[in-house]
Image (cartoon, rainbow, N blue to C red):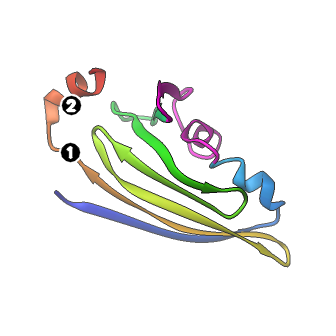
Amino acid sequence: MPIMIIRFKHEFSLPIEEVYSYFQTPADWTRLYGMDGNAKDLGGGWYAVPLKRFPFPLVARNTEQRDNELVRWVFRGFWRGQGDVHFTRGPNGVVIEGYEEIAIRWLFFLSPLVERL
């Protein structure tokens, strides 16, 4: 299964608390990314986060959080993987640094059925 790793480091001229608020749950990601609608709460901390122009949502839940310091998450369903983001106060705001490791499950036409289950 091919794996894509995305690493990032950005500085924002915003308070750390405001930037952290975009990562508190996967449902908050809809404010951050170009999503196609609202996230659906699946229970147990899992959320289905819709993506524009793609039939399968990101199904994710946070696995670890430290307010204004760290958020870790995992993906399940069509998208598999994990990621995290670290928050550091900087002289002009906040620095966020992290990664996402994403793999795609190869079910092709069966994936919509599996996602519904």
Residue matched to label 2: 111
The picture quadrant where one finds residue 9 is: bottom right
Question: Relative to 19, is 107 on the left or the right?
Answer: left
Q: Amino acid at mark 1?
A: Arg
Which mark is on residue 105? Answer: 1
Question: Relative to 2, is 85 on the left or the right?
Answer: right
| Vertical side of 79 occupied by 11: above or below | below
Q: Position of residue 74 (x, y in %)?
A: 41, 50
Q: Quadrant of the C terminus?
A: top left
Question: Relative to 49, is 114 on the left or the right?
Answer: left
Q: Position of residue 14 (x, y in %)?
A: 82, 60
The secondary element bearing badge 1 is classed as loop
Name of the residue lying farthest toward the bottom? 91
The secondary element bearing badge 2 is classed as helix
Disc nearer the start of the sequence (2/1): 1
Q: Amino acid at mark 2?
A: Ser
Q: Residue at x 22, y 27 (%)?
A: 114
Q: Residue at x 51, y 30 (%)?
A: 36
Q: Position of residue 59 (x, y in %)?
A: 40, 37
Label 1 crowd (10 A; few <14 / some 14-19 / many >=20): some
Label 2 crowd (10 A; few <14 / some 14-19 / many >=20): some
Q: Residue at x 50, y 35 (%)?
A: 45
Say how many tags the image has: 2
For the residues labelled 2 and 1, say whether their Cβ atoms are less than 8 Å apart: yes
The reply to whether the magenta stretch includes residue 12 is no
Q: Position of residue 68 (x, y in %)?
A: 73, 60
The picture quadrant where one finds residue 101 is: bottom left
Q: Which residues are magenta?
A: 24-45
